[in-house]
Image (cartoon, helix red, strand yellow):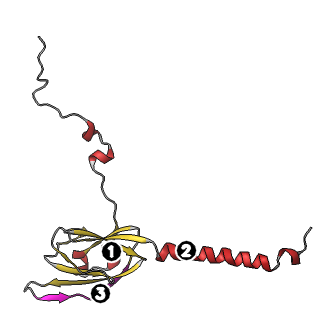
Amino acid sequence: MKSAKEIFDIRFFVRLGCIAVIIALAVFLYFFGKQRTLYVDNWSTEIDGTSYRAVDWAMVKVDDGKEQEYSPRQRRGLQLRGTEHTIYITTEDDNFNEVVLDPVTFTLPSDNSIISLPALVAGLDAEKSIQPFIPEPSPVQAGSAEAEAPAVDEFGSMTSDF
């Protein structure tokens, strides 16, 4: 049987240190190196019973990315790394004067998230403006009965049996 001195020699601590470094690197890369998708949405929406109308015009920049122009009913996806980000919004008021809003810092709750631009412009908190993005499958993808069923003819069968 080996003694404690033989088991806990310098090789044991080197191996233990290497395992700890690999685990720490994996955790770091998962949170800060993982690419996430953020969809910036300029559609009219309702959050917590309050309706927010789409913004007529806005310039949006996330982190150090490219500034993009948004019109009503537009949605664009951005690829981001990390979880904490800042969004910069420039829009117009009713007199067509340019208004630069304060930057909003937020964290992404999931890998695919959607942020409501009208809610942010109205002053809603960023955590309430961000939702996980779950795309709705098309009927063909979902394999629904409606997509696979033949169309019903109102006049019945048009074939004749002679």
Q: Which mark is residue 4?
A: none
106 horizontally vs 119: left or right: right
Q: Is residue 11 visible?
A: yes
Magenta stretch prevailing secondary structure:
strand
**Which residue appears at 32% of the width and 43% of the height?**
143
Q: Which residue is mark 2?
A: 27
Tell whether position 161 is magenta.
no
Labels 3 & 1 near each other (Cβ < 8 A): no
Quadrant for residue 128, please give it.
bottom left
Task: Indicate which disc, 3 or 1, sits on the residue closer to the N terminus.
Answer: 3
- Quadrant of image for the N terminus: bottom right
Q: Which residue type carries mark 3? A: Pro
Front residue of 105/126: it is 105
Q: Which residue is mark 3?
A: 103
Q: Is residue 47 visible?
A: no
Front residue of 29/151: it is 29
61 horizontally vs 69: left or right: right
Q: For the residue labelled by badge 1, is the local secondary structure a helix, a strand or a loop?
A: helix
Q: Which residue is mark 1?
A: 128
Task: Kindly report which numbered mark, 3 or 1, lies closer to the viewer in this rendering.
Answer: 3
The span shown in magenta is: 97-106
Q: CA distance from mark 2 to mark 1?
A: 27 Å
Task: Indicate which disc, 2 or 1, sits on the residue closer to the N terminus.
Answer: 2
> Where is residue 104 drawn, in percent x and y?
31, 84
Quadrant for residue 50, please give it.
bottom left
Q: Which residue type carries mark 2? A: Val
Task: Kindly report which numbered mark, 2 or 1, lies closer to the viewer in this rendering.
Answer: 2
**Which residue appears at 11% of the width and 31% of the height?**
154
